[in-house]
Image (cartoon, grey):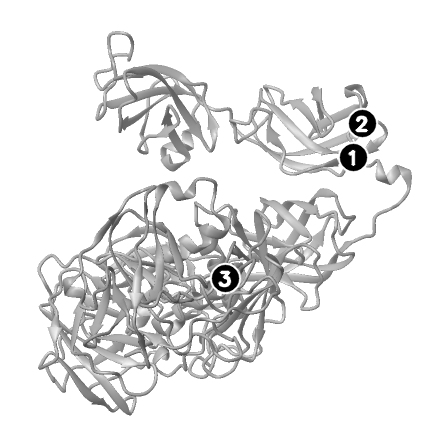
Amino acid sequence: MRRYMLAAATVLVAIPAHAYYHYVHYSNRNGANPQFEKFNAKSVTFFVSDQGPAILAPNDTFASVLAQVKQALAAWDSVSTSDLRVNFGGLEDKNQVSNSPGGDVVFEDLPPGLLGVGMPLANGTNILRSTVKLANNTNSGLASGAGPSYYEKFFTTAVHEVGHALGLQHTWTSSAMSQDVIRNTSRARPLDVDDIASLNLLYGKAGWQLDYGSIAGRVTFSNNTPVALASVVAISPTGSAISSLTNPDGTYRIDGIPAGNYLLYVHPLPPDAIPADESGLRLPRDQNNQPIPATPGAFGALFYPGISDVTQVQSRAVNRGDTLANLNFVVQAKASVPAYDLIAYSYLDVNTGSSFWDDGNANRSWASVSPAFIDTTQKAVTLRLTASFGDTPMPSAAQVLGGFAPTPRGDFLRPFADSLTGFQSVRLDLGIPLGAGAGTRHLVLNYGNDFYVLPAAANLVQRPVPTIQSVSPNTDGTVTVIGRNMDPRVYFDGLPATILNANSTSITVTPPPGAGGHSAIVTVFNSDGTNSLLLQQAPPMYTYPGGGNPQITGISTRTLPPGSTSYVDITTQDIRLVDGQVTVGFGSDDITVQHVWVKDANTLRANVYVAPNAAVGPTEVSVICGFQVASQPGAFNVQASFSSATSTATPVMWLPIANGDPAQQTIYPGASASIYGSNLGGTISAIQVSLNDIPVPVIGLASDHVNILIPTNFPKGLAVVKMIVGPVPANPVLVEIDAPPPSILRVTNVSGANFDALHFASPSDVVNVIVTGLDPAVVANPNRVSVTISGITMPPPSITSLDGLQYQLQFVLTQSFGSTTVPVSVAVDGSSSVPYLIPIR
């Protein structure tokens, strides 16, 4: 019996959330001096309303919703070239007032078809606060919202709306910031290059653009009239697409393009991009905060340098650090666009998990999925092209870029009456070329003198999608997942499990922490973007053993004034605390949790900072670990500052405490440490500092910091730092004392000869670095160790234990340094050895 699974995207009305590439302000209506709305901060924290969704889908929980929001924020935080850290802060009261910039995640009833909303509130170009609105009913994925939190659509929607909240609007490249109907991102690939470039334009680190190329030009009509808000796209035939919108004067610039070969094209915005109420793309503003409209009407899409037939277009090379300038377009006005908001589906055999060519076999059980997956081990596949509403316009030809042959209208490209939608759809049969490769591919539909591009229309994969046959708990608390075609990427309700051992048919994992009785949907997500939910509409579940309601039983410090720091101990009950997976929140962007440590099975320790402008009043304290959630509304209080002379002189230790050597990232016995702060007094003799109540020498004093010496015999671990200035104590804080950095004894070639005046190192040589003082645990976790030569990081070393507490780090030298003597350094967890000099040709 044939079976059809309708993806939610086919029935969702295309109602974009707040949109465009950035929220732009110009100094005049001609588009001079563009400025973007953004957070004027290095860090922004999002809190989630403790009310949660009013209605949860079957097997969905608020804990799972929180886990997805945390993962979505982590996706944006993972952009290494961005200077903005994006944090999950836990729970907040819905009426919480914060004076510091931040974000709120709330749950509301959404209009039909709307998956979510993300919007910044800005004062000019400074974002003061942002709101992400998710559905108040996770059981309504076919009406509004993204459905249950354990579905990938909920995660990608949360990523999309957080992007809006950070200052990004829509693009039309199928990236995370594209509206859902054309979006092709996944848990394996939550962001595309278009999203990363857009974020970097707002928050990129100094020099981030040096690793990328740029394209610039202008879009005009034949009479030189500029075209405003045209979408210009650089598209790699076998890679990603990246785009920008034109300014009011028709100019454009695309930054952040990875080096490679690209086709360049321009197209008008789809008709639904700018709704009358600006619920979609928010138009740019002039100096009076008045909107600057897009150029009215449509125009014909063009490939550079003015071609509408993709088969005649030559790609252009984009190099690191270079700009291709004056890539201009002259376009012709048209009454309408030929197509927009199309969806590409592939057919998957439910029994095998492979995509297939629809040969009319009525006995095949199948599913239709979007974005399309094409199994390149097959000879041919069928794609179904469907408009998000109405009939699908019939093209004269279609081509999937990256080695696929053009398909003219005929037996392999034809319209058909789609009984599932009640409208015309288009069938495209594709032969799979040899060496098709893997990854996203773009679809170009030719409409004579116009065309439509659906970036990332299909995902090329080289095996069937994964399926799970069973999920079995083991006596040691682990879980074994049995299935087929599986990568070692197992998620419980959207949180990743720890992989212990794996092959394509069996994976044993440690589940993420969960409260007793919590039932989690188990899903396998492969690195190619496929997942087991594509075929399993009744997915397997795992129920956590035990019972008890997670709760907070004690908070050591419940009040602090603005501008203060302190450590806080929090005791819990019925929560399995896992170091590195715990979020402690104080319910307000005015209160920053600098670091969290798991002290023991029931106790957490955290350094807390209250901003000088903090709103006075109660806040909510929450502890979240995996699917374990505990909170105490109003458990902490920001008290009004005292006005007496004594209180204003209270010393404050700022966080974090740093190594006195800026090149070192950790604090260890024998090192100096700098404690920055305020009200530190005027003489060293008036300052007393202790670690775990052991006095330590104060070796320096400046107006804003104190230097102390860590005793050489001081034990590793967490230490309570206390400071007294004269008779007045500061609130104590915590510092981690780490092991001293390793010492390099010698550096040798593969034969064991030292590199010296007679033995030079050369590129491709095997290099051995012999060290002492290395933490033995790094042998099992070599990612903690890095080797640099003259500041250039070498490939991760292999680590071998030698006699006499010595270790050998072995790697291959990757480059020449110009026949000179250069320093070699070994760092563990950021603590670097004293450099060791070797000669390199």
Residue placed at 30% from the left, 68% from the top? 331
Q: Secondary structure at mark 2?
A: loop
Which residue type carries mark 1? Pro
User: Pointer 1: what residue?
Assistant: 651
Residue placed at 50% from the left, 57% from the top? 73
Q: Residue 603, relative to residue 798: is it above or below?
A: below
User: Pointer 3: what residue?
Assistant: 30
Q: Image quarter for residue 124? A: bottom right
Which residue type carries mark 2? Gly
Where residue 819 sits: x, y (%)? 27, 16
> Which circle marks residue 681 in the picture?
2
Dividing the image into 4 quarters, which one contains the N terminus? Answer: bottom left
The Cα–Cα distance between marks 3 and 1, rounded to whole angstroms, is 53 Å
Which residue type carries mark 3? Asn
The Cα–Cα distance between marks 2 and 1, rounded to whole angstroms, is 8 Å
The Cα–Cα distance between marks 2 and 3, rounded to whole angstroms, is 55 Å
Residue placed at 53% from the left, 49% from the top? 85
Mark 2 or mark 1, which has the lower sequence index? 1
Work out whether residue 55 can be spotted: yes
Residue found at the very far front of the displayed protein: 223
The answer to whether the residues at label 2 and label 1 have Cβ atoms under 8 Å apart is yes
Q: Secondary structure at mark 1?
A: loop
